[in-house]
Image (spheres, grey):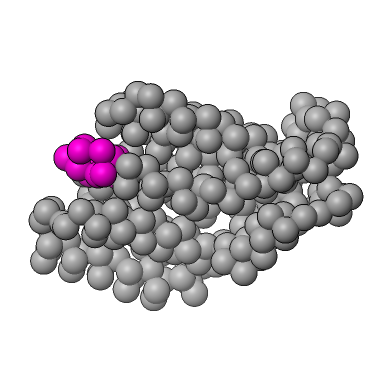
Amino acid sequence: MHWQGVALGYVSCLAVVSLTRREFARARLPLSIAAAVAWGAFAIGGRARLPPALDVAIPALILLGGYWLSGLLFVRPEARIERWLQSVDDAALRRVLVWYRHAPRFVTEYFELSYLLVYLAVPAGATTLALAGHADQVGRFWTVVLLAEFACYGMLPWIQTRPPRVLEASSAPPQTHAVWHLNHRLVDRASIQANTIPSGHAAGALATALAVGSSMPMTGAVFVMLALSIAAATVLGRYHYLVDTVLGVLVAIVAWTLI
């Protein structure tokens, strides 16, 4: 399995899924175009060897595009599932979340910065492999990461919810700071405004760490520490529910094991 095949299969599945429900009608044309472009690019380029810079950049852009494409299939939130997810958080995390909202500023800044770093962590993983003399492993890296991330995004048509930060009026800490505001501006303006179950943040961060660690164990350990911080931040910052993040971690482990 190669990352090109993962990407091609993902966009093709989204195009097919758009045909299954009347509510997805608005997504059919853009997803059909995306699938046609993907097939055309695959037919022309196939698995051609890319220059090192493009070997990092192109899959990263495909990952971002795949995320936005999944948002085309978001129709309406399912309140019953949202209530269940919230009830799990209330039972498991109520005291932790109360503590976090009143934690010292450096604690919230650390986790908010960790959440922000996920956007850099994934391409940084591929870049680290390339610069450290493991360029032959970059393709496998992207296969693991795209498989994990697209498995999460591909569930959006079937499980449609909003992130907890949208539903919880008290999710913001009493004293917000620059990183918190930056994160919220990013998710307000650049996200699909829907919650992915499993969490793409948790899955992508841990898949990155595991893929790097397969070739560079010591460096992989650093990425694992970052991935765990990102996973915690998704829940503490109310960007995801606990169930989302736990499932995202499991998806990453499965994807890495398969590849």
* Quarter of the rendering occupied by the N terminus: top left
Please give the name of the residue rendered at 23% of the width and 49% of the height, measured from the top-left corner: 5
Residue 133 in magenta stretch: yes
Q: In this rendering, is residue 240 above or below 32?
A: above
Can residue 5 be seen from the camera position used here? Answer: yes
Q: Looking at the picture, tell me which residue is in the foreground, 57 or 149.
A: 57
Q: Looking at the picture, tell me which residue is in the foreground, 228 or 245.
A: 228
Q: Residue 119, percent across and down? A: 49, 53
Q: In this rendering, is residue 25 above or below 46?
A: below
Q: Residue 40, percent across and down? A: 18, 68
Q: Residue 221, percent across and down? A: 44, 26
Q: Quadrant of residue 257?
A: top left
Residue 145 is left or right of residue 101, and the answer is left
* Quarter of the rendering occupied by the C terminus: top left
Q: Main secondary structure of the magenta part?
A: helix
Can residue 14 be seen from the camera position used here? Answer: no
Q: Write the start and end of the magenta stretch as one range.
A: 129-142
Residue 30 in magenta stretch: no
Please give the name of the residue rendered at 26% of the width and 44% of the height, measured from the top-left corner: 131
Please give the name of the residue rendered at 20% of the width and 38% of the height, measured from the top-left corner: 133
Q: Looking at the picture, tell me which residue is in the foreground, 248 or 233.
A: 233
Residue 49 is left or right of residue 71, and the answer is left
